Amino acid sequence: MNLYYLRDIRLSPRFVGELALWSFLEHHWAPDKTDTKLGESLKCFLEVVFDSSDYDDVKERREFNKAIKNIGKDLGKEYNEKTLRNILAHGKHFKLSEKWTEDNWSNFYMVHEKLFSLVVRGIEIEIAHKK
């Protein structure tokens, strides 16, 4: 695993980093590496990062999923993570986000930071289990 990729994500412009982070998540946690599906990868990722027997983890997982959906709502309708990623990939977010408020931007950045920290946590968990 190339951790320089995560460093580059952190150093890239925010939207490029967001898109790269979703792409990393999709491929790294894909149950089928030959036919990746973002929804399946996100599910596997969240199962690694959050302990389903821990109430606080379950609550945090739900809140994170809700935050992702709220970003989509801020863009005009309820989007799932795949659509949100595609909006970033095709540059539609520039037009859609022109009408965003400071709260909308704060929510977007909060989700990005949370996703980044969860990806790092997921990698740490994988490393600890491989010892």
Image (cartoon, helix red, strand yellow):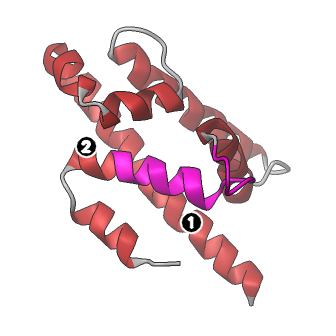
Rendered residue at 77%/54% (across/down): 51
Residue placed under numbered mark 1 in the picture: 121
Circles 1 and 2 in contact, beta carbons < 8 Å = no
Q: Is residue 39 above or below residue 6?
A: above
Q: Residue furthest left?
A: 98
Residue 78 is left or right of residue 41, and the answer is left
Q: Is residue 116 above or below residue 96?
A: below
Q: Please report whichever mark, 1 or 2, sits nearer to the chain's N-terminal start.
A: 2
Residue placed under numbered mark 2 in the picture: 15
Quarter where residue 123 is shown: bottom right
Quarter where residue 104 is shown: top left
The quadrant in which the C terminus is found is: bottom right
Secondary structure type for disc 2: helix
For disc 1, the neighbor class at 10 Å (few under 14, some 14 to 19, many from 20) is some
Q: Residue furthest bottom?
A: 131
Quarter where residue 88 is shown: top left
Rendered residue at 74%/84% (across/down): 130
For disc 2, the neighbor class at 10 Å (few under 14, some 14 to 19, many from 20) is some
Q: Position of residue 116 (x, y in %)?
A: 43, 56
Q: Nearer the viewer, residue 52 or 56?
A: 52
Rendered residue at 48%/13% (across/down): 78
Secondary structure type for disc 1: helix
Residue 5 is left or right of residue 56, and the answer is left
Q: Amino acid at mark 1?
A: Arg
In the rendered image, is residue 101 in sight?
Answer: no
Q: Position of residue 110 (x, y in %)?
A: 36, 41
Q: Position of residue 43 (x, y in %)?
A: 70, 43
Which residues lie in the magenta part?
19-36
**Disc 1 from disc 2: Cα separation:** 21 Å
Question: Which mark is drawn over residue 107?
Answer: none
Q: Residue furthest front?
A: 34
